[in-house]
Amino acid sequence: MRYSFTGNKVTGTFLILAFVCLTGCGAKPPEKIPTLKETAQLEATVDTSLPLVQQAYSIASEKVCEKHAGQWKRIGKQQKESCVLPASDAGKSCQSSRDCEVACVALNEPVAPGTATAGVCLESTNLFGCRTYVSGGIAEPTLCVD
């Protein structure tokens, strides 16, 4: 079979179509793949501008968790390994969760919802279990998180 750039309309049309298709693909050069060292540095970085609970959820390894004074634990009903960070204001009195790093919970439970109550800041980022949160010095309904 002989190919010609001039006498054969089918071949010419095919070449033009092939050229348009190949140039129009817009293939991008591959992105730089991070080295193992760069990957380790990224995994060890915790954005401390985030709220404490989000910081804890962003930590994916025991080593990084311990570096940030956390405990690597199995938590929740599914017993998923997670980082639990301590709150620096644990036990401080509060009126609402905005007063705390993590949350404001009733000092003495059980408390009826809608009742005025004293609150204290939660001790860690472990939000599992049953807790009565306090908002504006008033107990909210008890919330259980599995």
Image (cartoon, rainbow, N blue to C red):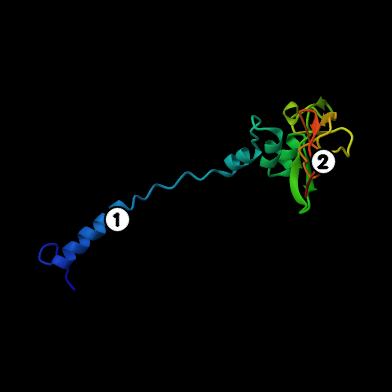
Residue visible at 68% across and 32% down in the picture: 51
Q: Is residue 108 above or below residue 3?
A: above
Q: Is residue 85 above or below residue 137?
A: below
> Is 112 left, or right, of 49 in this rendering?
right
Q: CA distance from mark 2 to mark 1?
A: 61 Å
Q: Is residue 2 above or below residue 67?
A: below
Q: Earlier in the sequence, mark 2 or mark 1?
A: 1
**Badge number at residue 52:** none
Question: In the rendering, at what x and y percent does residue 128 appear?
Answer: 79, 45
In terms of secondary structure, where does tag 2 sit?
strand
How packed mark 1 is, by other alpha carbons closer than 10 Å (few <14, some 14-19, many 20 or more), is few
Q: Would you name the residue on which mark 2 appears?
A: 131
Residue visible at 68% across and 44% down in the picture: 60
Residue visible at 71% across and 33% down in the picture: 52
Q: Would you name the residue on which mark 1 appears?
A: 22
Hey, which quadrant is residue 68 in on the image? top right
